[in-house]
Amino acid sequence: MRLVDLSVELATGMPVYPGDPRVTLTPALSVAADGVNVLHLDMGSQSGTHVDAPFHIDDSLPTLDQLPLDRFVGEAVVVDARGAHPRSPLGPDLFEGRIRAGAIVLVATGWSAHWGTDDYLTHPYLTREAAELLVAAGVRTVGIDALSVDPTPADELPAHRILCGAHAVIAENLTGLGPLIDTVGGRARRGLAAAAETARRRRRTRTRSRPHRLNRPHSCQKEHHP
């Protein structure tokens, strides 16, 4: 089994969402003075590669510990959006025919290549319609290799509100999705094609085996006399 780390490195001064707390890592204890090395971390909950709980955008929605664990494990479908332009919307057509209920949908925009630069804030984003399609398809885990599933900055957060409103979780600031596109994405496409072919065969089998109803000849019906 090949394991792929999709997280960015935590470091002092690393990029954060505009207005979020800055990240600082400082030594708290050392082997020389205390016998052990311990770091003091000062950071916001949405720093680096992280998962947004529904609670992130609404006090009445679940926190991470209130969600089922199947939100965080399962087969993934990697959707290739690397051709998207800066600040371009990713609509529902990107996902149609490529996703299935229960899958973890990872959106590969290629924007992790801009990590640590001003261009990282100009990432593509999901439209309201795309988020609605994902929820309607039964997807409850979405990840993206960008700062947010909504534009940055944003006065409103439509994709967040639709996904989190359905108790979905959102993984942001992923990295290294490129190598997964041909492996996971290809396997997912083959899986979907196989499922579609199985469904077609079942429909054909039901059609061939369906009994024909024979009408009783009129001459065999009983006559009714007044």
Image (cartoon, rainbow, N blue to C red):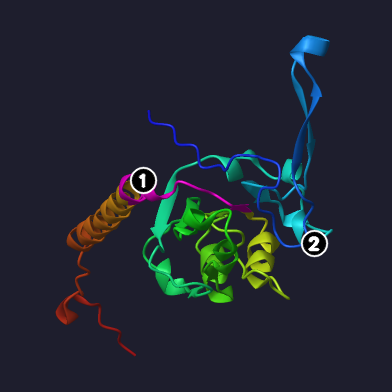
Mark 2 vs 1: CB contact within 8 A: no
Residue at 74% across, 18% down: 37
Front one among 108 and 62: 108
Q: Which mark is residue 58?
A: 2
In this view, 219 is above or below 202: below
Q: Is residue 139 left or right of residue 58?
A: left
Question: 81 or 35: nearer the eye?
Answer: 35
Q: Residue 208 at what x, y percent from top left? A: 17, 61
Residue 43 visible here: yes
What element does badge 2 sit on? loop
Looking at the image, is 165 positioned above or below residue 55? below
Graded by Cα atoms within 10 Å as few (under 14), some (14 to 19) or many (20 or more), the crowding at tag 2 reads few
SS label for mark 1? helix
Residue at the (76%, 41%) spot, across then down: 24
219 sits left or right of 121 in the view: left
- The total number of labels drawn is 2
User: What's the magenta region?
Assistant: 170-185
Q: Tell me the kind of residue under disc 2.
A: Asp
Q: Give the residue type at disc 1.
A: Pro
Placement of the N terminus among the 4 image quadrants: top left
Residue hosting label 1: 179
Q: Is residue 101 visible?
A: no
Residue 119: quarter of image = bottom right
The residue most toward the bottom is 226
Instruction: Verify whether residue 172 appears in magenta.
Output: yes
Is 75 a magenta residue?
no
Q: Measuring 71% from the left and 50% from the top, which residue is drawn there?
A: 46
Q: Position of residue 202 (x, y in %)?
A: 26, 55
- Residue 159 locus on image (x, y percent): 62, 68
Q: Residue at x 54, y 69 (%)?
A: 126
